[in-house]
Amino acid sequence: LSRDSWCCVAVLATLNMTQNLVPSWRSLLWPSSLGLLKVYGIYGCVRVVVGIMVGWIRARRMERILKDVPQHPNSSFLFGVLPEMIANFYRRHDWNDERSRGLPVSWSRGILWEPKGTVVIVRDPAGIRHFLKDAFPKYTKPSGVNDPRFMFLKQFLGEGIFIAQHGVGAPDEGRSWMMQRKIASNIFSRSNFNNYMQSVFQNKSMLLIKSLQETCNGSEPIDMQQCFFNFTMDSIMDIFFGEHADLLRGQPNTYGAAFDEAHSCVVEYSFKSTGFHALVQSLLPWPLGGDRGLACLLHNVLSSKYRRFWWAWRTLDAESRRLIRACRADPNLQERRDVLALFVKAEEKESMSESFLRDVVLSFVIAGRDTTACTLSWLFYALSVNPEVQEKLAEEIRQVFGSDTVPGFGDLAHSKLPYLNGVVYETLRLWPPVPLDLKEAQEDDVLPDGSCIPRHAKLIFLPYAMGRDPAVYPEPLVFRPERWIPFSAPSPYEFPVFQAGPRICLGMEMAIFEIKLLTIMLVRSFSFELAPGEAEHIHYSRKLTMSVANDKGRPSESEQLLLNVKPRMSQD
């Protein structure tokens, strides 16, 4: 029986036994406010007791299955590691690294009676391969039921490709995820890349160079991270949505600003309110409990972070729907090659709602804009604090391309530009754009090392922590591109920056080309130095994607990469 079924049985038994409290069945069932309140009061009390008991039993089952796996110490008997997790929110990737280092597989729990708070950290490449590839159908994205953090992510990104489930746990057996991936993959064909994407990235790169030439003076710092986000947004608006954007030349960035606001607020709010929402959703009866219950709604309304998320999301919703309607109404739709047009044209075979297409749009913004812009930001941060690396890279670029050649896809192989390739991979090692990812087990399973995994446990892999493991990378905090020369492509299970298995990143080659192309154009034209006083404030952001933040030790939030930019021609 389900938890609610047990509650109903318990209520009936309680009503039968509590004659002093409840005068008669007839008075209880008669539609009077007093009778209804008594029934609801009894049901609420029983719901809490039964919820705790059933949850405790299920959580103890998970604990028994995990008995041979090292467990992280609990900071609270009732709440497990939740207090420590919230206290380490602003350094959560380092915290995950510290508590799991040296352990191929380890686990922790959340609230004592909430089984879905069980988290297994997997750092063993064989284990990562197992749940990302070999046992792929058994592990999927969480549903959001009794999982506040994922519930709020679904509010943000809907049913897009990053949230859609696959395998045995998916309500539609993974049909939506598979359909989205199949349609989107068509844009990444080699002919489309060579004839379309390449020219977009080249043109946008030259626009950014021109913009910097007009504004840089070497004395006033420039927020290069904003430049990179504008560059990637301009590019994906064309490639993914078939619309011209000109943020690099000052066009208002309403969509990008709203996306960043919603992204930052929903991650912080969901993280810090996890305990409250887990308690309310798992224990309180309707209409107080549940993810749409009055308690959660009131908490959301009273939170300034949630209100900021909601208003930003309304902007995203309206703008995404505008893009969809414009695409559907375009008389030249059949000639368009962008991602949104591919989905709209697929409606000839399968109907898609406007809300679903909105979720597709939001997912491709975070995929095509945020991840690449984050990597570019950290790459130029690394160059700015390692001038010897920057100069060595500039010399390689000059030798290969001279001063004015615009590279194409075929010019950027690692064999032609080994040092540039090393700079890119060293950046991805230290600052992966998605530093943490997870799947949920849909049935009991066993990892290759013999670790038993219970159903509903969340398996987390940590590209950020794995890239800083001293057992794999000696002196891991040193930025050393030579680690990757001569280049041998790392196993995606040892270096899961782009995921692995059937959910491996579709746009991996596009992102690397975009990063290398813009790096060549910028380093050839300018030198970069971190603005004075910024070094001690640099940290990673609060988002799912790891952008640069410069608010460490400062009272207000800030995500800027302030660099002094100087034309190289004036220095040579």
Image (cartoon, helix red, strand yellow):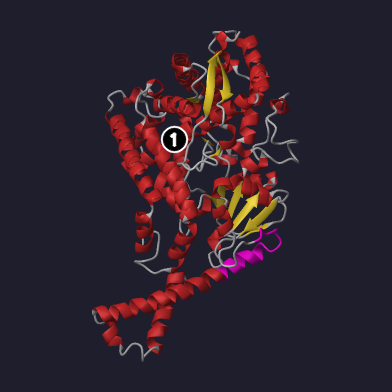
> Residue 313: horizontal and vertical position, in percent?
36, 43
Frontmost residue, 522 versus 453 = 522
Frontmost residue, 77 versus 537 = 537
For the residue marked with disc 1, what is the amino acid? Phe
> Residue 302: horizontal and vertical position, in percent?
36, 56
Classify 32 as above or below 244: below
Classify 207 as above or below 29: above
Frontmost residue, 348 versus 190 = 190
Q: Is residue 526 magenta?
A: no
Q: Quadrant of the C terminus?
A: top right
> Residue 451: horizontal and vertical position, in percent?
69, 56
The residue located at (76%, 41%) in the rendering is 471
Quadrant location of residue 467?
top right
Classify 173 as above or below 25: above
Quadrant location of residue 60?
bottom right
> Residue 80: horizontal and vertical position, in percent?
59, 62
Dot 1 alpha-carbon crowd within 10 angstroms: few under 14, some 14 to 19, many 20 or more? many
Residue 172 visible in the picture: no
Q: Which residue is mark 1?
A: 364
The residue located at (62%, 49%) in the rendering is 95
The stretch in magenta equals: 57-73
The residue located at (53%, 25%) in the rendering is 563
Q: Tag count in the figure? A: 1
Q: The residue tagged with tag 1: helix, strand or loop? A: helix
Residue 192 visible in the picture: yes
The residue located at (45%, 43%) in the rendering is 264
